[in-house]
Amino acid sequence: MIIVFLGTLLTACTDGAPSGDPANMTDASEQEKLAELGKRPDIDAMLDRYERLRTEIRARLVDEVGLPEEWELPESAWESENPCSAPYSTLGEAVSVNMVTWVHDDPIPENRWSQAQEVLTEVTAGHGFDQLQVVVDGPGDHLVRVYDSYGGGITLGTKKATILSSGTGCHLVPAVTSGSTPAAPAGG
């Protein structure tokens, strides 16, 4: 059951995701696109940032919402590195990453869902995640995403189990940043 839930979630992870306004980069040269991406933290810095956020979210869901501590990374799960979408799709020096999804066998009780959603938005708001998307909102079935200005997002969902997943926006690989990593926005 969890595998089907994860498959559905991962298929939809980037659907409708805000993209950090790449529209002004559509007609830009490769050098201009690289320069724009060079203003962002590199992919390693972003992966570290996302994992710190996910760790804090899981801890607060345990402490404040009452989930038991048994979060796990499924054995069959993997992290996938992907080419960036347009307008950065032609750049081999940049990637986006879908991180491994954390799973909890217990669902978040209906009477605690609003508190769980509040935990997600509070933890991420100070790190540039200011766009909330409610994907599913039914009795005992919830899925929300928060997005950062780079088009990356963190998803929290619950039904028969609880999941916490994330995918980054487009970022340069460390070798391209030549050792200089821009600071993440807003406390990142």
Image (spheres, rainbow, N blue to C red):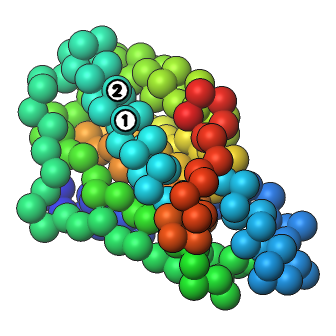
Residue 20 visible to the viewer = yes
State how many labels appear.
2
Residue 121 higher or lower than 79, as above or below = above
Residue 56 has which mark?
2
Q: Quadrant of the C terminus?
A: top right
For badge 1, the amino acid type reads Arg
Q: Nearer the viewer, residue 123 or 173?
A: 173
Give the residue at the far top of this rendering: 64
Which residue has dot 1 on it? 52
Q: Are marks 1 and 2 in contact (CB under 8 Å)?
A: yes
Quadrant assignment, res 79: bottom left
Quadrant assignment, res 99: bottom left
SS class, disc 2:
helix
**Residue 105 x %, y %:** 13, 40
- Horizontal side of 42 relative to 162 (left or right) equals right
- Residue at position x 58%, y 64% in the image: 178
Q: Nearer the viewer, residue 186 or 108?
A: 186
- Residue at position x 16%, y 51% in the image: 73
SS class, disc 1:
helix
Q: Nearer the viewer, residue 34 or 154?
A: 34
